[in-house]
Image: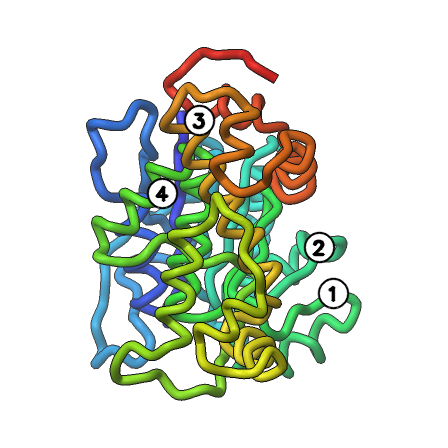
Amino acid sequence: MKKVAILVSPNLSLFELACATDLFGSKRPEIDDWYQTDVVSFYKSPLKINGQSNVNIEVKHVENLDSYNMVIIPSWSFSKLKLKPNMSNAILDVYSRNGRVISLCTGAFVLAELGLLDSRPATTHWLYADVFEKSFPHIQYKQDVLYQYDGKVGCSAGSSSAIDLCLEVIRDDFGYEIANQSARRMVLAAQRNGGQSQYVETPIIEKPNQFAATLDWALSQLSNKIDINIMASKANTSRRTFDRKFRTSLNMSPKEWLNQQRLNLAKRLLEQTNDSIDMVAYNSGFEKPETLRHNFRKHLKLSPTQYRQQFSCYSRTST
């Protein structure tokens, strides 16, 4: 049973709380073993929401987290609050029981204070990057990513990237299709990869352009060989300008983006079809099953067969 505690504190951020409660607290009776979620606090109710016109909320007061195996910390008023000893011990206890600890936005300060980020890359909202790095100089801080997640501990940058991390946790538990369903319920695109930039200097365009159209074209051609020079030509730019546009917008190269999209397609095919591994490799553009296996092990720490056994309704055991 997936028992989730959304752990809140005074002056919490309403947006990150809403992300966590919507994605993990909404009822999904059509999905077996869906999350059972409580909003809890070690602080007495009611709690004041920071900057929200003196809005107060009532939550469940707890003294421990013994009945939970995942803790989500939506935010933390790091400049005003010190960690309560019983709260610290409870979070560490969840972690020691092989549970997961997830932070959103400034919740990363809690994970850092508890030592859970000491051997892991970490991020938080870019506005607080300097404070975080000065407070925890020994932690490998990632300035320009959406989130970091290794299956046990996760932290996100601010605002919408909290949704991306939550969707990644859902994908980890239930697979690509359920994660996409969760995104669609919020009228969102599927979650972005954690390595994408959290702060893009390029202004948002008001209407579709050739760059966006080129990405759409590439997505329709994933099973075929795609030349990056042809993509640049379709975007009506030089190869150098096209590469720079990719780095600025998505914080990755065109080749890395194509590989990521093919990996997403392969995951979808493994979940939704009973095709052989060879056929999945071919239809997702990896061409050879060896290449598919290499990418799954590198990025997911699983073989394609293990992924299918975990997330597909099919019981096929092809290798």
Q: Are marks 4 and 3 in contact (CB under 8 Å)?
A: no
Q: Residue 167: x percent and y percent?
A: 40, 49
Reading the image, the residue beneath label 2 is 120
Whole-number angstrom distance, CA of label 2 to CA of label 1: 7 Å
Q: Which residue is mark 3?
A: 311
Residue 4 in percent (x, y) is at 40, 39
Specify few, some or many for label 4: CA neighbours under 10 Å numbering under 14, 14-19, or 20 or more. Answer: many
Q: Amino acid at mark 2?
A: Arg
**Is disc 1 surrounded by few (<14), some (14 to 19) or many (20+) residues within 10 Å?**
many
Q: Residue furthest right?
A: 138
Proximity of marks 2 and 1: CB atoms separated by less than 8 Å: yes
Task: Kindly state the secondary structure of the residue where label 4 is placed.
Answer: helix
Q: CA distance from mark 3 to mark 2?
A: 26 Å
- Residue 132 versus residue 245: which sits nearer the camera? 245
> Which picture quadrant has residue 258?
bottom right
How far apart marks 4 and 3 lie (CA) works out to 11 Å
Does residue 79 appear in the picture of this structure?
Answer: no
Indicate the secondary structure of the residue bearing disc 2: loop
Which amino acid type is shown beneath numbered disc 1?
Ile
> Which residue is nearer to you in this view: 52 or 306?
306
Badge 3, how many Cα within 10 Å: few under 14, some, many 20+?
A: many
**Label 1: which residue?**
139
Q: How many marks?
A: 4
Image coordinates for residue 15, horizontal then vertical, percent? 31, 67
Q: Which of the numbered marks, if any, corresponds to residue 95? A: none
Q: Are marks 3 and 2 in contact (CB under 8 Å)?
A: no
Q: Which of the two discs, 4 and 2, labels the residue nearer the N terminus?
A: 2
Q: Which residue is mark 4?
A: 179
Instruction: Give the residue type at disc 4.
Output: Ala
Tell me how far mark 4 sits from mark 2, CA to CA. 25 Å
Q: Does dot 3 land on a helix, a strand or a loop?
A: helix
